[in-house]
Structure formats: structure tokens, C-alpha cells
Amino acid sequence: MSNGVLTAPGLAFPRETFAKLTPGPFLHTHLKQTKPLRPNGRTPEEFRQPIVNTGSLSHSNGSTVVRVGDTAVVCGVRAEVLLASDIPNPPRDGMQDEELIEELGLLVPNLELSTGCSPANLPGNPPGTVAQSLSYRLLTLLHDSHIINPADLRIQYTEPPTEDDETGYAPRIVTKAYWTLYLDILCIAHDGNLFDAAWAAVMAALRNTVLPKAWWDPDREMIICSPLVSEATTLQLHSLPIASTFACFSTSSHLKQRKEAESWILADPDSFEEEICNDALTIVLARHQNAQTRILRLSKTDGSQVNAEAVQGCVALAEQKRAVWESILTGG
Amino acid sequence: MQADRRRVNAPPGGTTPPVFATPSNTPIARPVRSRQPDEHRKIFLRTGFVPSASGSAYYEIPPETTSQSKTLLIPSSSSLKITCTVHGPRPLPRNAAFSPNLLLSTHVKFAPFATRSRKGYVRDSSERDLGMHLESALRGVVIGERWPKSGCEVVITVLEGEEDGWWGDAQGAEKSGGWGMMGVLAGCITVASAALMDAGIDCVDMVSGGVAALASDERGNGTRIVLDPSPSEHDIKAACVVGYLQSRDEITEMWMKGNAGVQTEALIDEAVKAAVMTRSVLGEAVKESVELKANHTDRNVKEKGSANDVTMTG
């Protein structure tokens, strides 16, 4: 069948019909052209450009709206105070600073999908498996990346010397409370590759987060904050990891020889491509200042269809994307 | 309360929102209404931002920046931000009973960061109540007989809600006047109406929401009626929301709170006036979306047969 002849409407279906009836062959036909072009008009290696807006929510310490193509995500950071005396199992003395955030659960990311962002995600239900796993992946990545300095989350107090102390005794500094950051991520519109968008939103919102100056008031025995912007501090991140997701489309099937199968790597899949490709490869790259880029996480589902060279190619693409997104997130 | 096993939970010790102590040399001033009593705040309304939904709309009342908002971390007032998606009409599930009409279901949820105190993820009764009000506003507008055995979901997410009062008034205790809900409902009605139009669901008319309030006059001792009150600017005595069909001169939904006394009718009239003002914005937004759709189909027809198409064989 050849398209492009408008005079035979009885035989030719519009593109949308083919996409709906036979999504797999439809994508395959697009990819096997001499210059492969995906149905959404991008080349296989092309990412969508994000649009980032920060500080639009007035009741959050930090907030962003990230739009990647038709996927839109809102992230709001709320800081609340966790009193050290309220912690049931106080942190051990010898504990490393890095473990502190994870041990106390000071970062609470939650991704909400059931906002009607797509027909499959209607509200009224508890978060499904996808939402739960995405929240968990965000949480573990936040812990693994160590981007937040635990010292920034401590609210400390220097105890005045008591009468029992000898003279010349150094004042004791105790941590009276910790800031807990609630990261609420709402998916407003879902068109594939939610993890990249959600992670970028978290990063941009954390960069934008302002913590008020807080101190322990010994008379009232509570934490008091200063509302002045001039005294507040902006949260500093050690690095800005960027996640890149690839989908793998393959023509392999049980009825064919394995060597006959062709496969393509599709960068930044949209929801149509995500539905067809059951394979996904997520690479998270981070770069500390003036250092080499390091792979923070590389996760791949369903291991049969991508070989090692392809993964290396993906890492190179992810590095390109990281540089572009980093400049957008820091500039905007 | 039992921990929600499906979400990442707060630390077991429980956290408290920060308590602010304003230095005595920093004056805290209540925001003052700068517009006329019969002047509506500016509204931003856009449709079609969620392509996978049948219809969608975004409604915003942009914040007014004051000098105070730059020096204090505490926001002096809130700005309304509401998104709405419409899914449907689509067939009812097989096990549902027969319905000769379109079954409309509404769902309103506040984002956790929508209000001054953090909201939970599970819908509370005030959100459910808001959903009921919205449903009664929309039910009279949609021509349901045209879609028997079908359902339609109207989903609203409030990204930022209106406040119930001025934060300086209610130190510590949250004032439970609920005036903010009135403004949110009016916004919900307007945004849902725009999303329904975007979804192409037949309606008898465009319904729009409006609020008016009876507030004590700052200059004198009496009271005055103001359109579209921002609760942080006024001391509200009574308020009224209407869902109004202008061309039919009908009210589909009315919610009044507080004691307006003899001024009840005047208050309703003013709320209707506010609804008429919102309708002009709604009309423009719907017109814009129709034009955009018309252009889009034009372009699709032109592109057909060009290099964008691929040949499918086998």
C-alpha cells in the first residue's frame, strides 16, 4: 500500500489509524527507512528539550514546573522540622554523615500519577505499581547520589557552659532538630519518560529551595525560624545528576532466528513508544565540579536485546544530554 | 495513624511546620485591595495542555507582587492555580448498570503544596464536598441524553488554593472560615467548563463561576459587597458562589456561607456579575482553542502525502 495519494480515500487509512491498529509494524516501518525517523518526527537519538520554570508556587520552599515535550511535572519542596528528641531511634554517635539522611528519612519524595494526567491514570485509586516504583527509584537515587550536604539540614545549638564545667571547657554543639524535605511531585500531563522529567524537576526544585534561618529557643523549648529572606540560605547541591532513558525496539520474536532480529535504540521515548518497547535503559550521569563525568546509576530491564556497544553509545548520548540539560537547569 | 505503605512516609518521629518569629522592627501589613469593589482579578485560562486527555484546561489568577513578598519568606497572599482534565465520554464498564444519560463524575484534589499547611494525599471531606458542588454545577449544563451508557470523568488538581484568611490574623490556629474554598469552587467551575468545551462535550451553554463577598468596609464602619474577594485582603462576613449560564440566565449552583441578612439578594446579584466577567475570559479561551484546532486539521491535511508519510508493506 502506498500512501500519499489523496484520491483514493477508500483504501488509505490516516496515520493515526495505522498507529492504533498495528503499533509495532507502524514503528518498525518508520525506523527501517534509510534515514530513520520516529513517528513523532524525531531521529532515534534525539531528546526532547525541557522547559523549566522555577519558583512558581508560593507555599513551597522550592518549586519547579518541568515540561518535556508533552510530559509536564510539577515539583514542590516543603521543609518541616523534625525534632531530635522525637526520633525514636536516635542516630548512633559513630554514624557517618552520609548515612544520616537515609537513616532518618529526611528526604520524602512522592510521585503522584493519579491526577488524570493520562486516561490510564485516573484518580480515586491508591498509587499503582508504576507510581510506587518511580517514587522508590527517586528515593534511592537521592540517597545514592549524596547531593545534599547533611550539615545543611541540621539545626544546631551551642549549649551554654553550666556551673559544673571547668573553665576553658569547649562549648558543646548539639543538633536539636533536622529539616525534613517533602518532595511532592505531581504529574500533570503524561507523555512518556516520566522518570527523566521527575528527576529533573526534583533537581531543579532542590536547587531552588530556600531554608529559613532556624535556631533553638531554650526558653520556649522549640525551634524558631526567621521569616526574613535576607537570612535564609539556598540549598547547595554537590552535583547535578541528569537521568537519560532509552527504549529499545526490537523485531525479535520466538518465531525468528535471533540473528535476523534488528533493534533500535530510541532516546527519550514518548508514551506511544513506551507501550511498544518493553525494554528500557536508564543512565544517570553526574559530574562534580572540574571532574570527570561518572555513571551514578545504570539500570536496564529485560536484558536480551541490547549489546555492550549499544550501551556505550547510549552513555555517550546521555553525556551529551547531561551537558544540555545541566545548562538549562542551572540557567533557568 | 497507620502509615501508608504505598507511599514514602515522613520520618517516624513526625515533623512540624516551621514556626516563624518576626522581628519586631519588621512591620507586617495586611495586603490591601488595590482594585475597585466591582473589579475582578486578572484570569489566565488556557485549554488543551494535556494532549492525551479528551479535554483539559489550566486556570490561574496570577499573584500580585508586593514589596513585602520580597523581604519575607512567608507569602503574603496566595494565587489560584487549577488544572482540569476531562476523560470521556467513554463506555461504562461492563458491570455498570444501564444509564440513559452520560454519567458525570467529578474529582477535586488539592496538591500537598497547595495550601499553607501541608495537605495529605488522601482526599479529605472538604475536597469531596467541593467535588459534589462542582458536579451539581456541571450536571445541568451537559446534554447527557446524547451519550447513553457512557461515563465522563472531570478531574481537577488544585496546585495552589486560595487562603481562608490573612495569615497574620490566625497565629498558630488555622482559621476555619472556609472562605478560600468559595474562590476555589468558582475557579473549578470555570476551568471545568473550559475543559468540557475542549473535550467537545455538548453543553446547553458555557457555565462560569463567580464569587462575591460581604466584607466589612475598611474605611467606614459598615459593610460593602466586593466581587472576587481575596480572603487575605478582607474581613469577610458572608460569601456566595454561583455557577451561572449567561445566555439562559440560569443558576446551576449556588453556595452561600455566613449571614448576609437583608443583603442576601444583592450578594447573589454581585456573584452573578462576577460570573459574567469570568465568562468573557472563558469565551476567549474557548474561541482560541477552536481556532487552534481548526489550524491543526488544516495543517494535517496539507502535510498528508508529503515526506512525513511512510510506506507500509507486508
Image (cartoon, coloured by chain):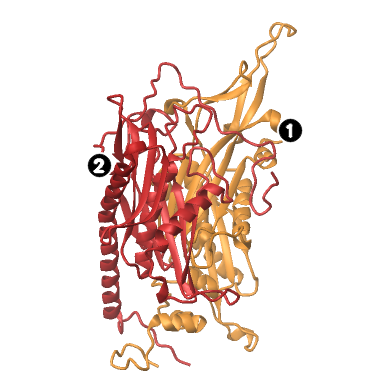
Chain colours: A orange, B red
Q: Residue at x 64, y 89 (%)?
A: A255
Same chain for mark 1 and mark 2? The answer is no
Residue marked by disc 2: B39
Residue type marked 2? Glu
Q: Nearer the viewer, mark 1 or mark 2?
A: 2
Residue A61 in percent (x, y) is at: 48, 38
Percent position (x, y) of residue B238?
39, 38
Label disc, if present, on residue A90 of the rendered structure? 1
Name which quarter of the figure residue A165 lies in: top right
Q: Is residue B261 visible?
A: yes
Q: Label 1 is found on which chain of the structure?
A: A
Q: Is residue B308 above or below residue B258?
A: below
Residue A27 located left or right of residue B59: right
Query: Could you say which is closer to the camera, residue B122 or residue A280?
Result: B122
Residue at horizontal 59 percent and vertical 60 percent from the top: A125
The residue at the point 62 percent across, 61 percent down is A128
Quarter-of-image position of residue B261: top left
How many C-alpha atoms fall within 10 Å of the one at disc 1: few (<14), some, or many (≥20)?
Answer: few
Q: Nearer the viewer, residue B277 or B49?
A: B277
Residue A232: image x %, image y %?
A: 47, 29
